[in-house]
Every structure is written in C-alpha cells, then in structure tokens.
Image (cartoon, rainbow, N blue to C red):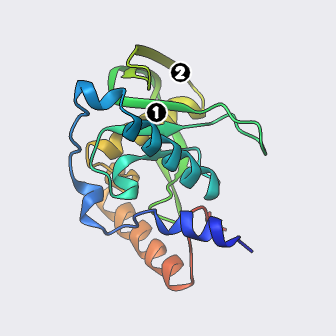
C-alpha cells in the first residue's frame, strides 16, 4: 500500500491520452537552466519518479512543457544516481537496432516491445549550466535516454509501434486503467 506522500506524488503524473504528451516542449532559456526554480522542478520530478519506481521522467509527464528529463537507471532502494538533463539532444543514435520491452509512467499497466538503435550519444545541460555528454550502448540507459527525450518532442512509446500493435497496446492500456492501474504498475 502506498503512503499518502507517495499517492500525492503519483497524482502529479500525466496519463495518456492527455494531449500534453503529444506536444513539443520548449527549450529552457539560458537563465532558466541555472535557476532555483529549475532545481526545485528537478527535485520534484525525481521524487515523482522514485515514488512510482520509474527510471525516467520527462517534463510533459508532469504537465511541464519544458525540455527537462530526469533519469536514474542505477538506483536500488535508497542508493541513487540521478541524471538531470536540460534541453537534451540526441547527437548520435546508431548501432544495431535492439528490441526492448518498455514501460512508461504515463501508460501504467502495460509494456510494449520498442525497437531502437542500440547506441546513443546525448548532449544536455546539467543544473550547473554545464554542457554534458552522455553515451550509452546496449543497455537500459541507452533505451531510457531515447524514451525520455522522445517525450519532450511529443513522442510516446506507442508511437513507435505498427498501427495494429498500437491499437492492441492502447486496448490493453485502457483495460489496465479500468482495473485501477497507477503509475509504476507493470504488465503482469
């Protein structure tokens, strides 16, 4: 059973078919990147992500139409290693295509097989205003970077599916919602 605080954090998460999940997000202005408000937003997003046992969360998933992403693919229990990516850009996405079963906090109760390039290089600013480079290959970080950056461009995991698979996934999602699925719930 989730705590009251955890339930409040889960309420922040925007669920499909909210139209904000299909919109392009605005980049943060230079002065916004190092602002206390952006730091506070990143903390809120990390709290939301951890409350839902997620490994990534993007601005539009909490209704903030800015290019901000938080990721932590390494955390176990209380040990955390979060990344905050501001104005992230995929510089390179190459290597063999790899299929990975993806879930999404905005589509609770389902997972879908998405094929993505296995290697990715991303540039993004951190909370100190430094331009950082993230590189990942063949692992969860490679998938998560691409999945979350898709969100700031209005693309969700089901948009990568064929029309028939998308219909099937959305049907399963609606059924999961009808059965009470909440962010962080995974397909059984």
Q: CA distance from mark 1 to mark 2?
A: 9 Å
Q: Is residue 46 shown left or right of residue 13?
A: right
* Helix, strand or loop under label 1: helix
Q: Nearer the viewer, residue 162 or 88?
A: 88
Image location (x, y in percent) of residue 163:
29, 61
Give the residue number, with chain letter if any, for mark 2: 136
Q: Pick the quarter of the image with the N terminus.
A: bottom right
Marks 1 and 2, the one that precedes in the sequence: 2
Q: Is residue 127 left or right of residue 102?
A: left
- Residue 83 x %, y %: 53, 30
Q: Is 10 drawn above or below residue 49 in the view shown?
A: below
* Local SS, label 2: strand
Taking the spot 40% from the left edge, 35% from the top edge, the residue there is 36
Judging by the rendered image, the residue that carries numbered circle 1 is 145
Expressed as whole percent of the image width and height from the top left, the position of residue 175 reads 49, 81
Quadrant in the picture for the C terminus: bottom right
């Amino acid at each position: 059973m989730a705590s009251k605080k955890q339930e409040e954090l889960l309420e922040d998460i925007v669920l499909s078919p909210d139209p904000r999940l299909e919109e392009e997000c605005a980049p943060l202005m230079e002065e916004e990147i190092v602002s206390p408000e952006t730091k506070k937003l990143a903390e809120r997003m990390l709290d939301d992500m951890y409350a839902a046992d997620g490994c990534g969360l993007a601005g539009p998933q909490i209704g903030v139409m800015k290019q901000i992403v938080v990721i932590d693919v390494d955390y176990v229990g209380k040990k955390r290693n979060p990344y905050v990516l501001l104005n992230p850009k995929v510089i390179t996405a190459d290597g063999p295509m790899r299929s990975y079963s993806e879930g999404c906090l905005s589509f609770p109760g389902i997972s879908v097989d998405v094929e993505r390039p296995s290697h990715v290089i991303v540039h993004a600013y951190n909370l100190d205003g430094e331009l950082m480079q993230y590189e990942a290959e063949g692992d969860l970080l490679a998938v998560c970077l691409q999945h979350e950056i898709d969100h700031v461009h209005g693309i969700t995991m089901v948009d990568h599916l064929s029309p028939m698979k998308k219909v099937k996934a959305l049907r399963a999602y609606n059924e999961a919602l009808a059965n009470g699925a909440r962010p962080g719930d995974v397909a059984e």
